[in-house]
Image: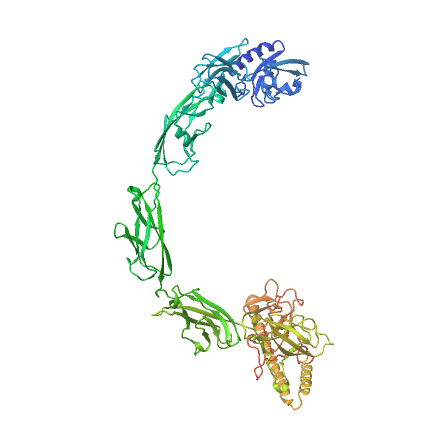
Amino acid sequence: MWVVGRHWGRRERALLWGVLVATWDAAWGQLRYSVPEEVPKGSFVGDVAKDLGLQLPTLQDRGVRVIDRGRTQYFALHGKTGHLVTAERIDREQLCTTVQQCVLRCEVIVEGEMQIYEIEVEITDINDNAPSFKEVVLEEKISEVTAPGSRFPLAGAHDPDSGSNSVQSYELSGDKHFSLAVQTGPGGDQRPELVLAKALDREEAAFHELVLRASDGGEPARTGTARIRVVVLDANDNAPVFSQAEYTVRVPEDVPVGSTLVMVTATDADEGLNGHVEYLLKKITEIASQIFQLDSQTGAITLVRSLDFEDGDTYEVEVQARDAGGLFDTAKVAITVTDVNDNPPELTVMSQLSEVSEDSPSGTVVALLHVQDRDSGPNGEVRCSLEGDVPFRLHSSRSSYYSVVTARELDREQVSEYNVTVRAADGGSPALWSSAVLWLRVLDVNDNTPVFTEARYSARLPENNAAGALVLRVQAWDADWGQNARVRYLLGEGRVRGAPLSSYVSVEAETGALYALRSFDYEEVREVELWVRAEDGGAPALSSNVSVRLVIVDENDNAPQVLYPPAAPLAAGAGWAGVELAPRSAEPGALVAKVVAVDADAGQNAWLSYELAKATEPGLFRVGLHSGEVRTARFPLARDAARQSLVVVVKDHGRPALSATATLTVVLAESVAELLAELGSAASAATPGEPAGSLTRWLVLAVAAVSCLFLAFLLLVLALRLRRWRRSQLLAAGSGALRGVPASHFVGIDGVRAFLHSYSHEVSLTADSRKSQLRFSGASCCDTLPARPPPDEPAPLLGEDPAAPPVSSDGRPFSVTLPSAAALPFPRRVLLRPA
């Protein structure tokens, strides 16, 4: 029998013994097994089928099952192997807290034989718990006078495991003053005791830190620790002790009254009242008692009367420190009074300059000084110095005379004047000093050129400005002073569009203001580049230049100019006029005309928009807002007048906006007769005195041109039909038929063969290439290729160049539409079938 678990060795021997016991007890109707705690779920416990003599195939038939009387089912029977396995993880310490031997009981019922077998499973302990103390920190209070060998019981550790897995030993570490003793109780439990091995001294150590470690007997062993803090209680066994046996202090005679001269300090290693120290004066003279005072609590000796070096230079007193138990210590204090340097040096200015040029050479003398001190010795030795970082230095000419000279070249633009402080200090301790201030002004030299406030100037000037308008103001600064810093401005030479620059702009010499002398036109001059020179008033004068960029800003001062339709003759009246022809069968969106306009301005001022201001039929036409294209908005109706007058307004986006108008005349006609009649009526309605024969002549020429174009189209169609017939004859002679289809049903167009069962097309001819189109009707035959071009890309007529629209003799586009077959000698819709 094998048991699945996490620990081996001793546990395997216990399992082997459990197997032998189970084999013996099986004969008496009772099985007994053993399994370690904490084994995983499904671990093997015992071979019940083998021990009971049950065959595996009959386990299901006989109905063998396990019944556990407890609340939790800890065991189960494996149906295929007949093994008793664990159904849950088992914790011995949780199940058997008060008993040494932990046994779980269950029953195996064999329903086929009506037999019940009892099973006892002993749960053996494993070392899965470490010893632990109830309190992690243990505190003991022991007086420092406690005799060595004294014992102090300690709280033991607890281990829920049993047997050798429980607590087996204790160890103490951390301090040589203590040792550990372990006593065995009546029940075999171990009780640790703390033993004082060496006398304690609170002044040496106020507390001791120890570590108590408990170990069990498992493999591997587990341990638990507790920290022991031993607090040493104090006893009055120490006298106060001064920090030093003799205090020596040197004080000057001018020390102020109330100053602390020295502070004596005594410490007592005891605690509480035993460690409180009080200070007393002993063996002090009557004069010293009137000068010095001792603070009994802090030990500070203070001055209560002024000292005088001539009256006394040394004082000695004795100070006693005493604690509450009567123990004391004594220290001597020696106070030495030192002489004071009470005479400061005398500093006198013998000669001084008030002004110096900034280009003066280094070493120029600016002042002569004399110093003296009435003291003697080190207190009478005087040292002179200059305060601050100044471009001067002191030069000693004699023992008591000093001269102040320049150390380097001066720069008035950095510092224009100096307040030089000369300091004279003696060698006393502390040193006394006196000072003198020399005021010196630096005279200017023209050594700086004017500097403009900006590296480059730029300004924007609207066109059509008034003459004399202020453009901008340049400004230059000169670091010099007076006349050397006075700046005047000059305009550099240059030309604009062949004219001198001075005729366009000018600069004011004193202020640097730049003025426009004339009105600028953006369409002529868009930018002016010039130079301005700044010149100071020095001798010689210094100057610098700066670039100025003047940008002319466009204004909306040009109205849109209509290029198409062209302007009407003056005799015909003011405004714009144009004639466009449109068929009555035109679809919505069909292009009728296009208004073309330009604006001489720039930017937003040149953005144009088109609006239909007036129309004979307001809903018949519409104008593109940005394109200017005039298109039909709906189908023309019979009630619509044949002659439509449109007024298109062209506006720019300036502020305020400027506009122009264009007048278009659109003629709706379905036949040449209607066209001629309408044009004739238009000619008769012309201005009295204007010849109408010219208009009629142009109309006749237009009809003749259309007729010639139509005859050319007929010839082209006949040539194509002849070519197709010849190709069909060649196909018939060469290949006969293709899949039962006659060769005559194939027509070659540009080398591509298309099967045409029957087809039809519409031909719309106009003089404008945008309207000429050849449309194949997709509804006539489902087998033809779609030939209707997009509305915006009309197909050109055969043999016609779409890029070259016909024009009249005066250069105006000529547009003619053939809308109906009634007025022409050929039908508008022609049906072509193969021969």
**Quarter the C terminus occupies:** bottom right
Residue 224, percent across and down?
50, 20
The colour scheme used to paint the residues is rainbow
Visible in this render: residue 515? Answer: yes
Q: Nearer the viewer, residue 462 or 280?
A: 280
Residue 213 appears at what percent x and percent y? Answer: 48, 19
Task: Residue at 29% x, 43% y: name it.
Answer: 376
Q: Point out residue 147 in the picture as x, y percentages from the top left corner.
A: 46, 12
Note whether 606 is above or below 205 in the view shown. Answer: below
In the rendered image, the quadrant that contains the N terminus is top right
Q: Residue furthest bottom?
A: 689
Position of residue 53 relative to residue 88, above or below, is above
Say how many tags the image has.
Answer: 0
| Depth check, front residue: 71 or 320 | 320
- Of residues 804 and 349, the one drawn nearer to the viewer in this rendering: 349
Residue at 47 percent across and 67 percent down: it is: 458
Side of 355 relative to 811 (left or right): left
Residue 474 quadrant: bottom left
Q: Residue furthest left?
A: 398
Above or below 380: residue 213: above
Pick the front one: 54 or 232: 232
Indicate left or right for 669 with 48 as reference.
right
* Farthest residue, direction right: 639
* Residue 388 falls left or right of residue 141: left
Instruction: Decide if residue 220 is in sight here.
Output: no
| Residue 658 drawn at (x, y percent) | 60, 75
